[in-house]
Image: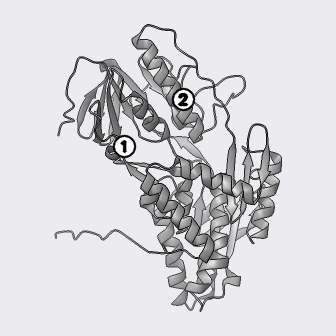
Amino acid sequence: MKANIPEVENKRIVIIGGGFAGLTLARKLVKSNYQIVLLDKHNYHMFQPLFYQVATAGIEPSAISFPYRKVFQSKNNIHIRKTEVLKVEPENNRVLTKIGEVNYDYLVVAVGATTNYFGNEDIQLRSYPMKSVAEALTLRNSILQNFENILISDNAAEQEAMMNFVVVGGGPTGVETAGALAEMKRFVLPKDYPEIDFNRMNIYLVEAAPRLLGGMSEASSKRSYQYLMKLGVKVWLNAAVKAYDNDVVELSNGASIPAKTMVWAAGVRGNTLEGLNPEIIGRGNRIVVDSFNAVKGYSNIFAIGDVALMQNEKFPNGYPQVAQVAIQQAANLVTNFKNMEQDKTLNPFHYRDLGSMATVGRNLAVVDLPFVKFYGWFAWLVWMFIHLKSILGVRNKMVTFVNWFWNYITYDQSLRLIIKAKARPVKG
């Protein structure tokens, strides 16, 4: 197979990855004098902040996924190839992919981050991550299948394990997932499964640090803790997961929890890209870059978003791996590509913190803005508005809003479907 990308006189920018960073860069460069090539193993962009709502049957997967080719319809200056990158060859200015070689004048690595299991293979094999739409759907299937299995089980210990849900990680994903599960327990599941006593269902949120939402203010951390307790979530702080085997979660504080489902939201690490000098891989498997997002030791390779490690006095461990950093780095790099074209001085990247937020449940959210912090119902409305605004596509915004509105007025969800891929027959 061949990539079949036309050769032109214009310089070519190859972007690996179509997350917040890569897609923002491509959209802002598509009308430039550069030829743009976007490589991604999927043919769609995923809105990661709402994966947990797919996993808890709040919204449909298609509402937070948007095809790249729809984004770039009628744009002739971009070439999209669905493929997996195998290796970068900086000495030859080319990328090796499953569909062939792709040459570049400039390369932008925007491969994002993946789940960090901190070297624990048992946890990696048995827990449920949420770094893609497919993983969120797998978790949804597991949650719903548990209750189907409870109905046909006569083993008390087995039933207990299926009624316990452990969410590991007290960041926004963990807090939001635990809150969504608690609302399913209160409002949705008892109507679907009247034969089950949901007083036996337990939701645990386990965090190794002394507080939740470590990247937000102390006030927001305390408020989110109070909200979760109000919803009936059992929050365990200063507790790390030591092992997960035989459907039992072992914690560092000596406790053990029988649980068929453990959601792992405890950390991320940069995705690996073979071919770059291993010496430029820093903390969290991230690629070390300078203040212009140029990869250390390379003049025409850049890294942006979650995979980029830009260290300075204020952020010695690199900027937080959040969407706003990725979007702002992409926008700054666009300016610098245009400056390079005109032999102008490059602009160093400066992060503008626009704030952070997390929702715990119905009318319960926390919002930290640079100059004000607020909580509760108004914060929940702000959270919804910001997320709706950020989702790609008018149709997706409308579908998400309708789902949220319907859930709000009916205390119900209509997406509790167990959908699994059918295995293809293997010829003997």
* First in sequence: mark 2 vs mark 1: 1
Left-right relation of 208 to 325? right
Residue 170 percent coordinates (x, y): 70, 54
Answer yes or no: is residue 31 visible: yes
Label 2 neighbour load within 10 Å: few <14, some 14-19, many 20+: many
Of the residues tagged 2 and 1, which is closer to the observer? 1
Write down the residue under mark 1.
71
Could you say whether the residue bearing mark 1 is in a helix, strand or loop?
A: helix
Does residue 120 appear anywhere in the picture?
Answer: no
Instruction: Please name the amino acid that badge 1 sits on.
Output: Val
Q: Is residue 318 left or right of residue 313?
A: left
The residue identified by callout 2 is: 329
User: Mark 2 falls on what kind of element?
Assistant: helix
Task: Tell me residue 137's x, y (percent).
Answer: 46, 64
**Which residue shows up at 54% across the image and 37% down it?**
306
- Please, what is the three-letter code of the amino acid marked with disc 2? Gln
Is 220 left or right of 45, judged from the image as shown?
A: right
Depth order, front residue of 33/81: 33
**Where residue 385 sits in the image (x, y, percent)?**
61, 52
Quarter of the rendering occupied by the N terminus:
top left
Label 1 crowding class (10 Å Cα cut-off): few <14, some 14-19, many 20+?
some
User: Closest to the observer: 312 or 154?
Assistant: 312
**Quarter of the rendering occupied by the C terminus:** bottom left
